[in-house]
Amino acid sequence: MEFVSTRGGADAVGFFDAFANGLAPDGGLYVPKHLPLLPSDLLIDDALPYPALAWDFLGLFDTDHDSEHLIEIVDKSYGDFSDTMSAPLQQLAENLFVLELFHGPTLAFKDFGLQLIGNLFEEQIERTGNPINVIGATSGDTGSAAIAGLAGKKGVNVFILYPKGRISKLQERQMTCTGAKNIFPIPIEGTFDDAQAIVKALLGDNKLKAELRLSAINSINIVRVLAQSVYYVHAFMQLPPENRDDVNFVVPTGNFGNIFAGWMVHQMGLPVDQFVVATNQNDILYRLFNSGKYEPESVHPSHAPSMDIQVASNFERFLYYHNEKNSKSTLELMKKFQEEGSIEIPNFNASNFAASRSDDESILANIQKVKEEYNYVVDPHTACGFQDLDPSKTHVVLATAHPAKFPDVIKKAIGETPTEPSLEALKKKKKVSYPVEATTEAVQKFIEDNAVS
Ligand SMILES: *Cc1c(COP(=O)(O)O)cnc(C)c1O
């Protein structure tokens, strides 16, 4: 399978290069050249074991690895999730289901993408003989999932910047208590945006990037999207047959990555009625799906911090398909967006989508409501998915994180503090972090001094 850029100014590449490049050289995002139809046997059998399904699905796109190698990588990525289903579907009511995506090592759905990415990096380093240095900025879940995917692997050092004091204590422990020598969590004085600006400056320096063999961890890698498509099929196959005719997936959304993964597999033939874009108070996507206007505002920190974003980077992929794969008009719109700061999408048609919005008060109320009505505890991100659901339709709400990751908000909502054994175990481990001054120069120097070579 070949991958092309949404902006049309880069050569088509195979799976290896689309994975290694992350961003296309013309600044666009890679998308598969064609979306193949889902093989019908995937939708006939009962739910396949997760690694087998992932292998069947990813093999449609990854024609660079031989299949035995891919099986090995996929098994390693999903074989030891804590629940044998990896992504089990829980039924709360006749028409209401929760897809639990928090059984990976860091208890959030990002493990599905980043466990695979970690093993693909390892395989790439072995295949090419070239070590790499991975850098990224995180507001919590991405950094810890990336670290869990790469801790202890040979030929790679990992540098993750995060805003000191602005991520949850447990998220910080997940990054700093791995005990792995190749992991460098870097707290900086400042905000997530400051951390991200430094990472962008380093990655934008092509000379430095080549010298240090820098690779990025962020949500634009197409492989993360493909990895996430798999659990939509897995969820569908776990539904009782009578619920399969009008499925609505409700997706707590920030960067539009997770929901785009679902929409893509729907384009490949998975029967879905609608995708519900569930935002917190940072509601750029809610406003978009109600007005056709894409217009960032400033970010207001919320109870669902992993969705506190301004610009949804994966939206460009949706725009490309909305423009009927016309990369010229996608490029023009993205240019206009960069120049003017907002865009009106021409002939906006999003009949596959609905949208909801939860402010902090609704997040607390939804956690309470779900506990009272179904005796089930959801995390603050997942809580956004329970806003304004029509009870006459089948809904599958994606549970994006384990509630024990956000004990303070849960306590505020229902007066109890959820716990989880792996998080409790972290509290006994030693924290190791590397504070660096929040300037590009200082971070560059630190990476140069500690790079794997
Ligand atoms: C990252 C994250 C989200 C948002 O996912 P997107 O792919 O950015 O839409 C939602 N919930 C949790 C817990 C997350 O970590």
Image (cartoon, rainbow, N blue to C red):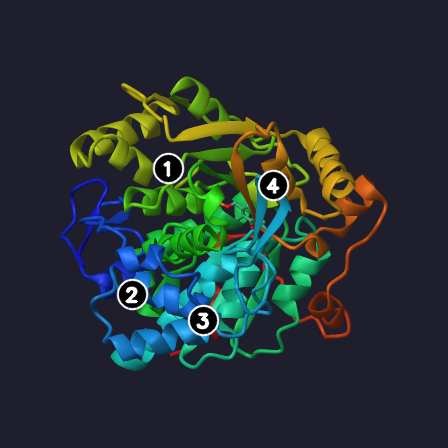
Amino acid type at image mark 1: Phe
Q: CA distance from mark 1 to mark 2?
A: 29 Å
Of badges 1 and 3, the one in the foreground is 3
Please report whichever mark, 2 or 4, sits nearer to the chain's N-terminal start. 4
Please report whichever mark, 4 or 3, sits nearer to the chain's N-terminal start. 3
Q: Position of residue 124 (x, y in %)?
A: 31, 74
Instruction: Look at the image and tell me in which quarter the N terminus lies.
Output: bottom left
Rendered image: mark on residue 315: 1
Q: CA distance from mark 1 to mark 3?
A: 27 Å
Amino acid type at image mark 2: Ala
Rendered image: mark on residue 77: 3
Nearer the observer, 31 or 100: 100
Please report whichever mark, 1 or 4, sits nearer to the chain's N-terminal start. 4
Nearer the observer, 105 or 308: 105
Give the residue pinned by disc 2: 210
Please report whichever mark, 3 or 2, sits nearer to the chain's N-terminal start. 3
